[in-house]
Image (cartoon, helix red, strand yellow):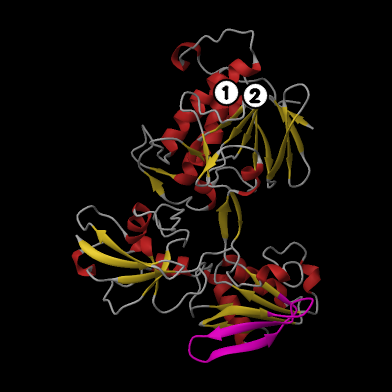
Amino acid sequence: MIETDILIIGAGPCGLFGVFEAGLLKLRCHLVDSLPQPGGQLTEIYPKKPIYDIPGYPSVLAGDLVKNLMEQIEPFKPGFTLGERAESIEKLEDGRFKLTTSRGTEHVAPVIFIAGGLGCFEPRKPPISNITDFEDKGVEYIIKDPEIYRDKEVVIAGGGDSALDWTIFLANVAKRVSLVHRRTSFRGALDSVEKVQYLAKEGLIDLITEAQVVGLKGADKLEEVVIKHKTAGEKSQKTDHFIPLFGLAPKLGPIAEWGLNITKNAIDVDTRDYSTNVPGIFAVGDINNYPGKLKLILCGFHEATMAVQSAFKIIHPDQKLSFKYTTVAGVNGFEEAAA
Amino acid sequence: MVKITVIDREDQPHELDAPTDMNMNLMELCKAYELPVEGTCGGMALCSTCHCYVQNDFELPEPSEDEEDMLDQAFFVEDNSRLGCQIKLTDDLDGLKVKLAPTAG
């Protein structure tokens, strides 16, 4: 079990900066994120995009901003639980919260910051009406164990790196791999594109371009996919598995079930300190909602800073908080990471 | 100001007054009228939540490679598919009719 002062859900820019502000007040933080690396949207969606409205940076690449934030918070030795989704929160008898992740990791803290951005990133599911009927019965959005495809018929859909990479990998595992893509060109890495084209030319995979999977058929499990070709129309193909690989999209997810007041997929907060309707839980950054809300990183930095001040009063109700500038007090980090 | 018709996912048409002097795009217009367009990435052609179909014969600027790449992650993409965020509102668009594409599950 992991214990900390402030448990931050979401390791995007606002969550990361919260660690710095908390550290200045000698509060320790631990971050939980469903993605395998810190940075949130900045790392996952647009690492190479320049951002122009971070004060003091005329231009900074999103990926570099995350790198800088990680460097800035390093003295405060934050803990990370990455690649696990924050699943449930329960209030303990001692007044603290226990947060359990999708993998069962338990975290206990008196204060929780929800800095979850747009929610957790989950695989995009094609809007095929009966697709949920076949989940884990032939339809997988993530490849966890490639061995389940051994000697099976597999249809992969998508045109990016993961679709290409898995097509190449499974070509040696599955009985037959078909890759369905809507265009003739691919956006993936050049050598992967060339490899896939080579495999198709040699007849080792079926490359079906200018086509999309539009339907699924089967009794108890997936038996056929319906492939619609741009000019040749629809045709069914027998298959054991269908793996749609269309990238990740954010979903609010379990946060919606935590008893917080939510308006339009965002958590209502009091702008004095960005506290939610549940005492001890704060929401900062893109995930909160208040009159005049702007979804800007710079606003999220402010919100996290204000929330930390109130968090201090909850964590140390008997201590008086004296505000100090970093120019006066410097940055006094923690000697070691939390046990 | 031009008129643009947006047909929502329930097939309801919405005739919108679209300003052409505010550097807006079609995704932002839909959001301003509170139509169900997420625009998750804020208009960087990085999420495909503003995927729509151009319904009438319009000479729109060709989609960029970035837009085509992102359409690869959208569903039910047709020849008339576009990302709303990549369609700048200009005076040439008077009478444009688009239909919102189905959302991913």
Q: Amino acid at mark 2?
A: Arg
Q: Residue at x 60, y 76 (%)?
A: A195
Q: Which residues are magenta?
A: A217-241
Instruction: Give the percent coordinates (x, y) of residue B39.
Output: 43, 55
Q: Quadrant of residue B82?
A: bottom left
What residue is disc 2 on?
Answer: A28
Front residue of A107 and A175: A107
What residue is disc 1 on?
Answer: A22
Q: Residue at x 28, y 72 (%)?
A: B60
Residue A27 is a magenta residue: no
Side of A113 where A330 appears, left or right: left
Side of A152 where A260 appears, left or right: left
The quarter of the picture where the N terminus of chain A appears is top right
Subunit of label 1: A
Residue A70 shows in the view: no
Q: Amino acid at mark 1?
A: Ala
Instruction: Give the percent coordinates (x, y) of residue B55.
Output: 35, 76
Give SS at disc 1.
Answer: helix
Q: Are marks 2 and 1 in contact (CB under 8 Å)?
A: yes
